[in-house]
Each structure stands twice: as C-alpha cells, then as structure tokens.
C-alpha cells in the first residue's frame, strides 16, 4: 500500500441475514421428539459401543421418525423444514449418543451436497450406505478413470457409494469398495473400516472453488452439531455431579477454581450452539457457496474446540471416577477427539477460513488503492 | 558423566546404563505387551513370564531403591542421584508403555510410606520381601474412597484397637495393583471427627480375612495394570502392622506421611506424562515424515510442523520442571512448589501433545492400531492421580500467593 492510499475504516460485514432466537412451536415439537428418542440412545450407548453397532430396532425406529431427510427439499423426498431445524436435531442426538447419531444420520448428510447441487444420478440418492472422504491434498491417485490409494479410517462398516472430494473434483465410486474392519478408539456404534482403494470412478464433477469449499464444509457441519451436543452433554453431566459431590466442605462446583471452569464450559457450549444456528440460517439464506461455507467452518471449529474443552474437563471434574467406564464422560472425551478429526478435521476448516480471511484482507487493500 | 545421549541432561554412567536397560526392556516387552493388554481389555496375569523374569533379575530390589530408598548419608561429598535417576528411568519406561511400567513388580506407591513412617523392624519385614527373587511381588497404596479422593481428610474407613490387634472396616477404591499385591498400605481413621489427626496407616497383608473381594475397574486407558475397589470387612491386623507404631501418631503423622510420598511421586507422575507425550511426538513425527512430502511448502505441512514444534516445546519445558523438582529431592531441599508445577504442567502438556498428535495423523488417529489413540486414553489419568491438576494449582497458589489453606487441602 502506498503512503497516499488511506486504509478503509471499516471492513465490510458478511452479508446481513435475519437472525432471531424464537424457535417456534413446530420446531420445539420436533426437538422434543428427538430428545425423547435420544433418551433411549443414551441408555443403550454402552451396549452399542460393546457390539460395534446399533440394534436393528434402533435403526428402524429412527427412520420411522422421519428426522433423517428433514432438511432436504420435497423434490428429493425430504420434508423441506430447513437446515436450522436439522442442525438442532443433530445437536440433540449428539447430546444423547454422538456415535449412534453418526451411524443413524450418516446417509442423509453424506448425500446432502448431491441433493443441494442436483449432481449425480438419481440412483446415488438411493444408496443405502454412502460414505465420504475428503482429499484436499490429492493424496489419492487418479489414473485411467480409477482412483487409488489408502483411506485409513471410515466411520462405517460398509459402503455402497463413496463420494470423494479430491481437490476441487467430486468423484463418485460405486464398486470396488471392499472395506476392511478396524478397531477404533471411539465411535464404535458407527462401525469402523479402512479402505485400500483401487476402483473405477462412476462419475466426476469439477466444482467452482467456492462450491468445492462449501461441499467440504457441509460435510463437516453435521459433525459440528454432534460435537456441540457432546460438549453440552459433558458440561451438564459434570455440573450435576459436581453440585452433588462435596469436597473440603462444599460442593465441588462451588470451589472457585472449578466454578470458573464451569463458566468457561458454559460459554463454550453457548457459543458453539449460537454459531451452529447462525451458520444454518446463513446457509439457508445464501445457498451453497463461499459466503455460507465460512459460517459452517467457523461453527465447526467453535464446536470442535468446545467439545474438546468440555469433554476433557468433564472427565477431570468427575475426578478418578470420570476415568472409569461407569460414567459416560470418558466415552465422550474419546468421541470428541475422534469426531473432530473427520471430514478433513481442523486443518481443512482452518485452511478454508484462512483463505477467506486473506481474501477479505486483500479486499481492504483494494478498497484503499 | 555418561555420553550415550539417552537423556538431554548429563547424568552419571550408572544412570545412562539404567536408561539403556530401560530402553531395551521397553522396546522388547513394555510396548508390545502394553498394546496387547489394551487390545485384550485386561492386564497380563501376575504369573506372566515377564514378571518372573524381572524378579529373578533383581528388578524389584532396584525399584525398592527408587521407591523406598534407604537414607543415603554416608559417602560425604558424593552427589545423590536417586531422584533424578528415578524420574529419567520412569520417563523412559513410560515412553514405551506407562501402563506396563506401573504393572511391574515392586512396592509401588506402598513403598514410600513404609520407608518413611515404618520402624526399622517394619521396613525389614515388609520391604525385604522384594529382595526375594523367587517370585514377583507387589505393594499397593490404598487411600482413596468413594467419598474421599482429593479431600483425603474425609476418609471413612474405620480402625479400632482390640487388644493386640486393629480391626479395619470400610471400602477403598481405585487402588492400583491391589488385586495382586502382597500387602496394601491402607489408611483408616480412629474417628472421622478428628480429620487428619485421626489417620493411621496399616500394612494389610494379602491373606488377611475380610480383605476383598477385589473389583477391577474398567478404565478409559492404562489397561495394563489393575485398579480396583475392595471392602475391608472387619479385617484384623496385628498391632505391629500399624506403621511407625502408636507413638508416631501424635499430630498429623499419618497424613503427613501420605503427603510426603507426593514430593517425589508427583515429579514421577510428571515424568511419566512426559514419556507418554514424547512417545506421541515421535509417532506423529514419523507418521508426518512418511505420509507428507514435508519439503513441499504447503500451508498444511506448515501446520503439521507447527504442531510438532509446539509439542516438543511444551514437553521440553516440562522436563526442566521435573528435573529441578528431582534435583531438589536429591539435595534434600523442599520441593513441593516445584513438584506441583511439574505435575500440573506435564500432565496438561502431555495431554495436549497426544491430542495434537492425533490431529497430525488425521482420521488415521481414530484407529487403535495407531499408538497415539491409546496414548490419548492413557495420558488423561496423569492429571488425576497423585493430586489432580486443580489440587496442584492450589499448592502452587499457596506457595506463591500465600493463598489461604482450605480446611484439609493436602493432596
Ligand atoms: C488410574 C488411577 C489410578 C489410581 N490409583 C490409586 C491408588 O493406587 N491409590 C489411591 O489411593 N488412589 C488411587 N487413585 C485415586 C486418585 O488418587 C483420586 O482419583 C484423586 O485423588 C482424585 O480424587 P477423586 O477421584 O475423589 O476426585 P474428587 O476429589 O472428587 O475431585 C473431583 C474434582 O474436584 C476437583 N477439586 C477437588 N477439590 C478441589 C478444590 N479444593 N478446589 C478446586 N478443585 C477441587 C478435583 O480436581 C476434581 O477435578 C487412582 C485414580 C486413577 C484414575
């Protein structure tokens, strides 16, 4: 910038969106339904972990609720109730049992970009067990219409469709998906596999950079809802425990050092929830592309940080008992760490947001020129 | 001073040799057996050949020297190295597998109270068994109860004198290695209303009627050693098993002996945390070198490199804290501030390190075959045992701010 070019005083804000916090009757009803279903998930969480999967009754009960395609348009067989409601439902399910929620809802969120972008043949939307993989660094090799390489972990026991976002190209694979079971450290109920890939690509589609970012972010976003739910679960559990347990003459929670941790946990939970809602509203208002992707990734990072913080302290504040499997907090701590590594994890989100921040900064420079 | 380069500070040759042996033990046994125990979901049985082999090789005596050292005073002019060599060896052993390291035979946390509070006769009776190489033996430390962990003054296990015996009644929890221990140091109270002044420490032999059954807890990690709860149902022990004898309990001797244990054991836990963290750092570094073409100047690679640098920096700072805390012990100088700093810092730094290591591995980090997933589960306990992170901060605040002493805050 030259000395004669003054800096702009104000960085332009993001596109204004309507934002209020009144959920409305219909939303509250749907959330009540999700919470009641979640109570059963929570009760069965250890069993699902031990058997590496969900009971078939649970799976069919979930599909009976009609929560899966809540946010898809009616043309795609959805209820058209919007991303905000869907996000809140996932937060409730993450609060109950994030691993189970991942298993139950994976299909809908893997396919969501196809529904939104209208890409891919109709048959893909019928896939029973779709899975996704993000490959921003193009580590997988593409040669003669085949995609090859190794995918170290997929939170799934089987896949009949694999969507891969490699750089800016979305690939779909329908055959050669021979998943090999692996033992995971968390999220057992979702299944766990690795894949040595050498399979023909069914179709590919090159995306605009902004749309490619949006696809990645939209895959991370439902995980953000589960992470926010986990953060809240851990906060609430530890809070109840520490209000009950007395040390040095008062409830654990009433020692100032602990009270401050709870205050930080409460803020983490609240900001994660608000960022999620804002991102969903923004995506509904602005549609696919960079302006809504930034909010989705921001929400993902906020939720991931909240979950890592709250689940670690959940174990810490329940003390030695928190390290034992008799309490759920140790499971939530493993799950928060695992969930926040999926779909590109912090690096993909940071990379994307850093790109946006640079664009914004150079817009300021141009404004000044 | 040694020169094998096994530790970043100069140490005598004796310590270098100890580190070299620990490395061999770690590579050949601790790492593979630790992973196996984790996969199986339970500890290796006490009759596992490794334990017998170590007993025969005199390993228990070596631990005795570390965990329950005889007062070294002779050898005027010779520098003491006991504490520093212990923490260096514990870091190394935990680098290979912290769970297995704790499972190895020896007096464990039971050693220090016997050494510090026990009469010469008691030291002989309870510690000499570790000189018998014919079979592996363990000691254990039973303080925590369901209602009393940090706030140990609240323990409710009662002890009552009946003639030449003491009768113990209550329940202990989270007592490590207790199901296989030859004896357990059990803390009990003559009267809960007396707080710490009512505490008495007993050595309860394994075969004592009324001791047990042991319920092994299912832990998040550290599966390679057993942590168990057990009742003491009218458990009678001879009066000679009251550590230090009746006269020793004027004032807070029982409590003070338990707290004194922590001056070295806190630095020891800190060193173990460092070992776990260093293991995660090495694994993540090797993974990064293999999986990424780090020479390419990509933002993603930069982020990986920054994570590795942060991990190393935190651990290195922590090692200095540990080293200083142990150096003070070797100089017979007070170290509770330094020990608490080492413990609070290293437990947190090591957790952060394993967590960042999982980020370096990305999705592969979720899979159990990758060691860091296990390290992430193992390391969390380091911020809970031997005084939680919060309790360490209270100690630091007391020492640095004259922070008022809460009723009974000791651990
Ligand atoms: C793997 C493992 C092995 C163990 N092995 C042994 C063993 O061999 N022998 C044995 O006796 N015990 C053992 N323990 C128990 C351990 O020492 C206790 O768990 C620990 O002292 C904490 O006590 P607690 O669990 O009752 O937590 P609590 O004391 O109930 O603490 C709950 C929470 O409150 C916080 N807190 C407590 N007081 C304060 C305060 N004043 N200010 C601020 N925060 C506070 C704590 O930091 C913690 O976060 C083991 C524990 C584990 C996890």
Image: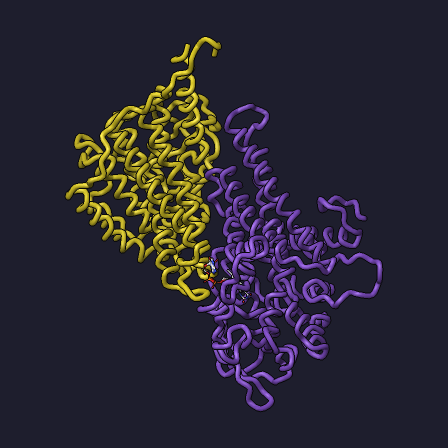
Chain colours: A yellow, B purple
The structure residue drawn at horizontal position 64% and vertical position 49%, both measured from the top left corner, is B321
In the rendered image, residue B129, in percent from the top left (x then y), is placed at 69, 74
Number of callouts in the render? 0
Displayed quadrant of residue A349: top left
In the rendered image, residue A280, in percent from the top left (x then y), is placed at 27, 34
Left of B195 or right of it: where is B87? right
Residue A274 higher or lower than B345, as above or below: above
Q: Nearer the viewer, residue B214 or B317?
A: B317
Left of A228 or right of it: where is B81? right
Q: Residue furthest right?
A: B76
In the rendered image, residue A108, in percent from the top left (x then y), is placed at 28, 37
The structure residue drawn at horizontal position 27% and vertical position 29%, both measured from the top left corner, is A283
Displayed quadrant of residue B34: bottom right
> Split into 4 quadrants, where in the image is the C terminus of chain A?
top left
Is residue B36 at all visible to an observer of this figure?
Answer: no
Is residue A287 at all visible to an observer of this figure?
Answer: yes
């Amino acid at each position: 910038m030259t000395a004669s070019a003054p800096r702009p005083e104000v960085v332009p804000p993001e596109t204004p969106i309507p934002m209020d916090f009144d959920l409305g009757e219909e939303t509250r009803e749907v959330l009540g339904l999700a919470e009641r279903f979640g109570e059963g998930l929570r009760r069965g969480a250890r069993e699902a972990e031990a058997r590496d999967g969900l009971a078939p009754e649970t799976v069919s009960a979930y599909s009976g609720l009609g929560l899966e395609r809540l946010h898809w348009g009616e043309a795609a067989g959805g209820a058209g109730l919007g991303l905000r409601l869907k996000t809140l439902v996932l937060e409730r399910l993450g609060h109950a049992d994030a691993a189970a929620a991942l298993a139950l809802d994976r299909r809908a969120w893997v396919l969501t970009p196809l529904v939104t972008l209208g890409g891919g043949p109709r048959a893909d939307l019928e896939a029973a067990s779709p899975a996704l993989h993000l490959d921003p660094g193009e580590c997988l090799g593409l040669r003669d219409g085949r995609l090859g390489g190794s995918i170290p972990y997929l939170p799934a026991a089987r896949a009949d469709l694999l969507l891969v976002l490699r750089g800016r190209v979305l690939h779909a694979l329908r055959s050669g998906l021979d998943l090999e079971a692996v033992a995971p450290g968390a999220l057992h109920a979702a299944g766990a596999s690795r894949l040595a890939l050498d399979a023909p690509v069914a179709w590919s589609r090159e995306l605009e950079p902004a749309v490619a970012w949006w696809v990645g972010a939209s895959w991370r976003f439902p995980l953000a809802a589960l992470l926010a739910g986990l953060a809240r679960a851990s906060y609430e559990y530890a809070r109840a425990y520490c209000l009950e347990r007395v040390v040095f003459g008062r409830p654990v929670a009433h020692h100032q050092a602990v009270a401050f941790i709870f205050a930080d946990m409460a803020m983490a939970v609240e900001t994660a929830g608000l960022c999620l809602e804002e991102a969903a509203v923004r995506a509904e208002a602005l549609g696919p592309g960079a302006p809504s992707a930034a909010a989705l990734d921001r929400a993902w990072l906020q939720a991931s940080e909240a979950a890592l913080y709250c689940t670690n302290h959940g174990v810490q504040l329940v003390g030695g008992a928190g390290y034992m499997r008799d309490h759920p907090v140790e499971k939530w701590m493993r799950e928060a760490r695992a969930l926040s590594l999926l779909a590109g994890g912090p690096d993909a989100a940071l990379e994307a947001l850093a790109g946006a921040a640079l664009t914004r900064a150079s817009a300021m420079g141009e404004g000044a020129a | 001073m040694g020169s094998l380069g096994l530790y970043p500070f100069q140490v005598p040759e004796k310590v270098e040799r100890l580190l070299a042996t620990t490395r061999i033990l770690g590579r050949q046994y601790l790492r593979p057996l630790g992973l196996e125990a984790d996969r199986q979901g339970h500890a290796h049985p006490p009759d596992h050949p490794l334990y017998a082999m170590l007993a025969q090789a005199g390993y228990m005596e070596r631990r005795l020297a570390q965990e329950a050292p005889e007062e070294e005073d002779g050898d005027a002019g010779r520098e003491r190295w006991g504490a520093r060599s212990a923490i260096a060896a514990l870091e190394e052993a935990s680098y290979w597998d912290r769970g297995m390291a704790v499972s190895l035979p020896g007096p464990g946390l039971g050693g220090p109270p016997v050494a510090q509070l026990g009469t010469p006769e008691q030291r002989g009776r309870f510690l000499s068994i570790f000189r018998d190489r014919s079979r592996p033996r363990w000691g254990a430390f039973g303080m925590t109860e369901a209602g009393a962990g940090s706030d140990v003054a609240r323990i409710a296990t009662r002890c009552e004198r009946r003639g030449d015996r003491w009768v113990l009644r209550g329940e202990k929890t989270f007592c490590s290695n207790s199901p296989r221990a030859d004896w357990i140091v059990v803390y009990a109270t003559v009267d809960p209303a007396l707080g710490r002044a009512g505490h008495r420490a007993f050595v309860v032999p394994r075969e004592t009627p009324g001791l047990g059954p042991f319920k092994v807890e299912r832990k998040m990690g550290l599966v390679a050693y057993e942590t168990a709860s057990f009742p003491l149902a009218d458990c009678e022990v001879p009066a000679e098993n009251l550590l230090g004898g009746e006269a020793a309990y004027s004032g807070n001797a029982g409590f003070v002996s338990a707290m004194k244990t922590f001056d070295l054991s806190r630095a020891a836990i800190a060193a173990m945390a460092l070992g776990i963290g260093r293991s995660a750092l090495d694994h993540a570094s090797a993974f990064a070198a293999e999986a990424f073409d780090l020479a390419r100047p990509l933002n993603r690679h930069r982020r990986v490199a920054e994570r590795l640098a942060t991990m190393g920096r935190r651990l290195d700072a922590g090692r200095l804290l540990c080293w200083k805390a142990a150096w003070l012990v070797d100089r017979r100088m007070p170290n509770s501030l330094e020990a608490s700093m080492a413990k609070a810092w290293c437990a947190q730094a090591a957790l952060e390190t394993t967590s960042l290591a999982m980020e370096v591995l990305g999705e592969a980090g979720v899979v159990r075959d990758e060691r860091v997933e296990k390290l992430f589960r193992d390391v969390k306990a380091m911020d809970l045992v031997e005084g939680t992170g919060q309790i360490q901060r209270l100690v630091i605040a007391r020492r640095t701010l004259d922070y008022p002493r809460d009723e009974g805050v000791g651990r």
